[in-house]
Image (cartoon, helix red, strand yellow):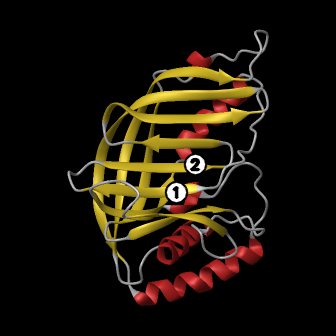
Amino acid sequence: MKKLLLGLALSALAFSTYGALVKDTYETTILHTTSVTGFGSSSLPDIGHLNGRSFVWTVTYDNEATSAPIYTLGPNGIDELGRGDDVVVSIIDMNHWDDLSFVSSALFDLSEYYDLLESFYLVNGLTPRPRAFPVESFFAGFENGEFTTVRNVDWNHLNVAGVGDGSVWGGADFEEGSIDLWGSNQLLSSAEIPISGTFSLFAVAVLGLMVRRRKDHGVRYLESGQAN
């Protein structure tokens, strides 16, 4: 129930009060995994562990928005998409790429992706290492119908450029080294979610309660509940 309430609250706060949100559901299949840096010959992980594995994920965005923040997380530790006490370091706007139709902050449910990465580092005895980069969490649509969406936070990232083979680039950082993974992506469904002003007020109240009660969950972030 807490995850559901948090997801509803963040969804309402992250987007325009009266806008129409879009929730897309995708399935990604990992085709190839490589070790990037840091691993010695004696600690090279079984990078084939992820090859051929699939995961379903969702992203929710506003297809009429015109900007999205890149930010660092504030002391409260909750990813508020550049709001609250997060510190905005730059803005992605309509001039960031040519022929943009919209660019929006995005809420992701990447729980199945995280489960695969967790299985990988447990099997190989690895320790996740937080990234030093600002958070990116956006969805950008182009006039020709193509899109790019990025979730880059904590110790992992997922970059998706449309659908088809080679459209997915992900990865994770560990104390022992880093990995990259490449995959294919297909759209399973897409649906509009209308948001009302009343719902946004409800979200503010829920977030206040959740911030007071939140416990530290280590390296696992809250996306698993944001889009439910």
For label 1, count other residues whose C-alpha is less than 10 Å away and answer few (under 14), some (14-19) or many (20+): many
User: Mark 1 = which residue?
Assistant: 137
In the rendered structure, the answer to whether residue 164 lies left or right of residue 68 reads: left
Identify the element where label 2 is drawn: strand
In this view of the protein, which residue sits in the foreground, 194 or 88? 88
Q: Where residue 221 appears, x then y in whole percent?
A: 66, 54
Q: Does residue 111 lie above or below 15 as drawn? A: above
Q: Where residue 91 appears, x then y in whole percent?
A: 51, 65
Residue at the top extreme of this rendering: 41
Q: Residue at x 72, y 29 (%)?
A: 122
In the rendered structure, the answer to whether residue 141 lies left or right of residue 33 reads: left
Q: Where residue 62 appears, x then y in whole percent?
A: 37, 68
Q: Does residue 74 lie above or below 31 as drawn? A: below
In the rendered structure, the answer to whether residue 142 lies left or right of residue 72 reads: left
What amino acid is at disc 1? Ser
Which quadrant of the figure has residue 223?
bottom right
Which quadrant of the figure has residue 198?
bottom left
Identify the element where label 1 is drawn: strand
Q: Residue at x 58, y 84 (%)?
A: 204
Q: Where residue 177 appears, x then y in whole percent?
A: 73, 26
In this view of the protein, which residue sits in the foreground, 178 or 115? 178
In this view of the protein, which residue sits in the foreground, 136 or 51? 136
What amino acid is at disc 2? Asn
Q: Residue at x 37, y 71 (%)?
A: 65
Mark with earlier residue (1, 2): 1
User: Mark 2 = which residue?
Assistant: 152
Q: Quadrant of the N terminus?
A: bottom right
Residue 87, labelled with which disc? none
The residues tagged by marks 1 and 2 sit, at their Cα atoms, a distance apart of 7 Å
Q: Are marks 1 and 2 in contact (CB under 8 Å)?
A: yes
Q: Residue at x 35, y 54 (%)?
A: 24
Residue at the left extreme of this rendering: 144
